Image: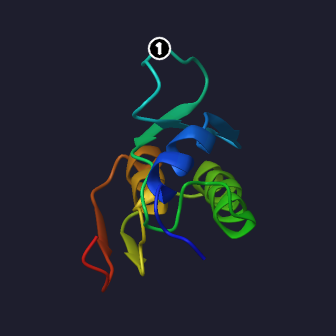
Amino acid sequence: VEAEGWLARTVAAFGEQAIGDFLIRPTHLPPRREYGRIVLTLDAGIAFGSGEHASTQGCLIAFGAVAKRRRIRRVLDLGTGSGILAMAAAKRAKRPALATDIEPW
């Protein structure tokens, strides 16, 4: 598969997404106030985790539900990709998150 122009195509296709308690907003869109959702802002990039994949969406929805029922004390995101799940957990739980991945980007 031709990789040339991949990032530009990704930026063009990466729009705002509302998923459960969260709103994923790419940095290439202008900021605006959002009420009732936690905003997660990230760059379109080559790391997995823009929120479009069903597994990421499922984790965001499940985490929002769990966080409403119990107090989150520690957050660990292994194989974090873009860090979207760690960001969601840290913002929702108002706790620091430890996130790590083996990919340099």
Q: Mark 1 points at which residue?
A: 32
Query: Where residue 46 appears, x then y in whole percent?
Result: 43, 64
| Most distant residue in the top direction | 33
Q: How many labels does the image show?
A: 1
**Residue depicted at 59% across the width and 30% down the height:** 37
* Residue 96 relative to residue 69: left or right: left
**Residue depicted at 69% across the width and 58% down the height:** 57
Element at label 1: loop
Tell me where residue 99 sits by quadrant: bottom left
- Label 1 Cα neighbours within 10 Å, binned few <14 / some 14-19 / many ≥20: few
Q: Measured along the vertical axis of the image, is residue 45 above or below residue 33?
A: below
* Residue 94 relative to residue 1: left or right: left
Asked if one can make out residue 35 in the rendered structure from this viewpoint, the answer is yes
Q: Measured along the vertical axis of the image, is residue 87 above or below residue 13?
A: below
Q: How is the image coloured?
A: rainbow
Tell me where residue 53 sits by quadrant: bottom right
Along the line of sight, the residue nearer the viewer: 3 or 78: 3
Q: Work out which quarter of the rendered image holds the C terminus and state it.
A: bottom left
Q: Measured along the vertical axis of the image, is residue 73 above or below residue 41?
A: below
Query: Where residue 20 appears, x then y in whole percent?
Result: 71, 43
Query: Where residue 26 appears, x then y in whole percent?
Result: 47, 37
Q: Work out which quarter of the rendered image holds the N terminus and state it.
A: bottom right
Instruction: Name the kind of residue labelled 1 in the image.
Output: Arg
Query: Where residue 40 appears, x then y in whole percent?
Result: 46, 40
Q: Measured along the vertical axis of the image, is residue 9 above or below residue 29?
A: below
Tell me where residue 62 sits by quadrant: bottom right
Along the line of sight, the residue nearer the viewer: 71 or 27: 27
Asked if one can make out residue 23 in the rendered structure from this viewpoint, the answer is no
Along the line of sight, the residue nearer the viewer: 74 or 48: 48
**Residue depicted at 40% across the width and 53% down the height:** 87
